[in-house]
Amino acid sequence: MQNANDVHVHKKSKVTVPTNMNKLGIRLDPHRREIAARIAAMISEVDPELNEISADLTHLYRAQIPVYDQVDPASIEHNTRAVLRIIVRQLGGGSAYTGFDELAALARIWADQQIPLDLVAHSIQIGARRIFDIVRQRATAAAVPATVIDEMQDLTWELATTSATAVHLVLQEQAVAGATRRADFLRRLLDGSLPPAVLATEARDHRLDPSHRYRIACAAWDDTPAASDLLATLRTRAATAKLPVIDTVIDHHLVALLPRTPDGLTQPGPIALGPAVPPTDATTSYHHARQALEIATRYGRTGLVDLSSLGPLPLLQCAADAASLLTAKHLTPLRNQGDSGAEILTAVQTFLDCDRRIDETAARLYVHRNTVRNRLTRFTELTGLDLDRTNDLVVTWWLLNRETL
């Protein structure tokens, strides 16, 4: 996000546009006020041709912009006409300073009506070009010098560019406010503090279907292009035709409600999923997702993971007290052997990693296969754990892998 003192510069007319709404405006010296007066002499806010432009633009928007074909055409034409009227009024105002509070207020109303403001900003520039086509024709017929017409064009374009910036700033303002509301909603949903009646009301605001089953997704968030790409991918692949992905960042983690499980998702780090649940049970799905993410991160797993896809790894999180007792009973005597005990532990861990294949274990350790056998035998003698017994094998795997946590 840019600093409030940053500026955008329009190369053609050298327009300096502050990005802070409070400072957004155009100052007109006496010469430029004279140019504005010439424009005002060519067109007024009640000019009949503005109605024709509004009708033409409404037809264009509905034909070429998918969102607009779902909006009442009379409403589009009315709003377009309002913008054109504001532009003409500002051009002919005769003031030394032109502000954009009226346009910003109108843009906020459109945002509440779910009209896409980025398209509104684009339509302002199209409308300004159409307005100046009329001004140019009338100025030429009135024998206005070409240099003056050029100055009139520059001022018209400056006003259009600044007007579009005002709308974009409202869009930014709305986006920040929407993100704040969404983050607050998700936090309350995930910690279970959202009463059912409030959930039903706010669900509509966030396009959440209370009867649908969502999966909670969690991933580390570091505000990098890679993280942004992941978010964009989730929003595309995990949404349905009617239900969007709802996301926010909580405690440096991207958290998202997914209407469906995304297909073919690859990622350098893990994206953890909780089970599919109705929104009222989102806390459970979130807890599972965070647990899966922690385990997957520690063990270097990547891509989509959930607790069921991590095999026995989630078991390593269990029974800390029992683990301490079993470690003291079985592993402490081995560790008391110093370096030889460490070699035995390494041999056993490698043996388990190689799915108990002696030759592969020997190759990894660069020792003879009989050396591996001798160390396994010595392990049993010192710990009392026989790797040929299922119970002892499970206890050994559990104890050794817990220590990597």
Image: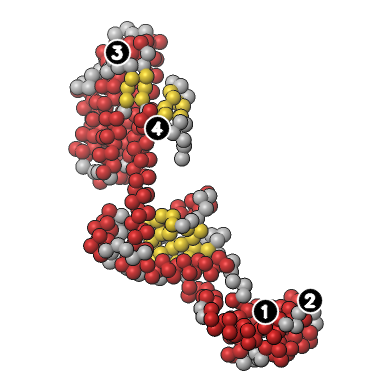
What amino acid is at disc 3?
A: Ala
Point out the tag, 2 or 1, that comes first from the N-terminus.
Answer: 1
Label 1 SS: helix
The residue indicated by pointer 1 is 349
Q: Give how far across and how far down residue 314 sits, in percent.
A: 51, 75
Residue 289 visible in this rendered orientation of the protein: yes
Q: Residue at x 73, y 90 (%)?
A: 377
What residue sits 29% from the left and 42% below the top? 111
Question: Residue 35's x, y, as percent?
Answer: 34, 13
The answer to whether any part of residue 209 appears in the image is no
Looking at the image, is mark 3 or mark 2 earlier in the sequence? 3
Location of mark 2 (residue) = 366
301 sits to left or right of 174: right
Q: Under tag 3, what secondary structure?
A: helix
The type of residue carrying mark 4 is Asn
Q: Nearer the viewer, mark 4 or mark 3?
A: 4
**Which residue is found at the position 34% from the left and 69% from the top?**
281
Q: Which mark is residue 37?
A: 3
| Residue contact between numbered discs 2 and 4, judged by CB atoms under 8 Å | no
What is the C-alpha distance between the residues marked 3 and 2?
90 Å
Alpha carbons under labels 4 and 3: distance apart: 28 Å
Q: Which mark is residue 20?
A: 4
